[in-house]
């Protein structure tokens, strides 16, 4: 996984290989984020390529925070490939159907063996 974004209301945690915010750029990002209305705290860990933002979701949007990071060049745009998501859904669906069929076969075998005994 090249990007990991964990979000709960009022907190964003980003860990990503694409997150590149070092030195002056990290300082600028922290200053600019903290200047935004509703941002409570910003913790940038360049060595771990991670960022934690505490914010008030009623005063600042998650999209605005990501846009600011993208503008500063601290992170690549987060993209969702619908074809990839669709393929993952199909794979999960097939696995789920396969597991259900296996369970049904096992149950049928138990019933058959029970009837023979």
Image (cartoon, grey):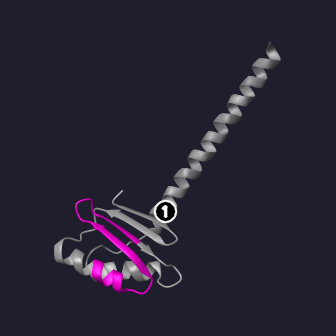
- Tag 1's secondary structure? helix
Left/right placement of residue 91 relative to residue 44 reads right
Looking at the image, residue 66 lies above or below residue 88 = below
Q: Which residue lies furthest to the front in this view?
A: 40
Q: x%, y% of residue 56? A: 49, 79
Q: 65 or 40: which is nearer to us?
A: 40
Please name the residue shown 47% across and 83% down the image: 60
Q: 96 or 2: which is nearer to us?
A: 2
Q: 45 or 67: which is nearer to us?
A: 45
> Is 39 one of the magenta-colored residues?
yes
> Is 83 one of the magenta-colored residues?
no
Q: Which residue lies furthest to the top in this view?
A: 117
Q: x%, y% of residue 6? A: 44, 63
Which quadrant: the C terminus? top right
Question: In which image quadrant can residue 23 be found?
Answer: bottom left
Which quadrant: the N terminus? bottom left
Please name the residue shown 47% across and 67% down the image: 7
Q: Residue furthest right?
A: 115
Looking at the image, residue 36 lies above or below residue 22 = below
Q: Mark 1 points at which residue?
A: 85
Which residues are drawn in magenta? Answer: 30-53
Q: x%, y% of residue 93? A: 59, 52
Question: In which image quadrant can residue 112 be found?
Answer: top right
Please name the residue shown 24% across and 69% down the image: 20
């Amino acid at each position: 996984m090249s990007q990991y974004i964990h979000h709960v209301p009022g907190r964003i945690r980003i860990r990503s290989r694409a997150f590149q915010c070092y030195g002056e750029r990290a300082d600028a990002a922290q200053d600019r984020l903290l200047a935004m209305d509703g941002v409570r705290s910003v913790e940038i860990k360049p060595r771990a390529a991670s960022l934690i933002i505490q914010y008030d979701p009623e005063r600042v949007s998650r999209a605005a925070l990501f846009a600011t990071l993208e503008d500063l060049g601290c992170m690549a745009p987060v993209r969702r490939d619908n074809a990839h998501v669709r393929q993952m859904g199909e794979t999960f669906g097939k696995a789920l159907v396969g597991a259900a069929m296996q369970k049904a076969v096992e149950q049928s075998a138990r019933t058959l063996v029970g009837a023979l005994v």
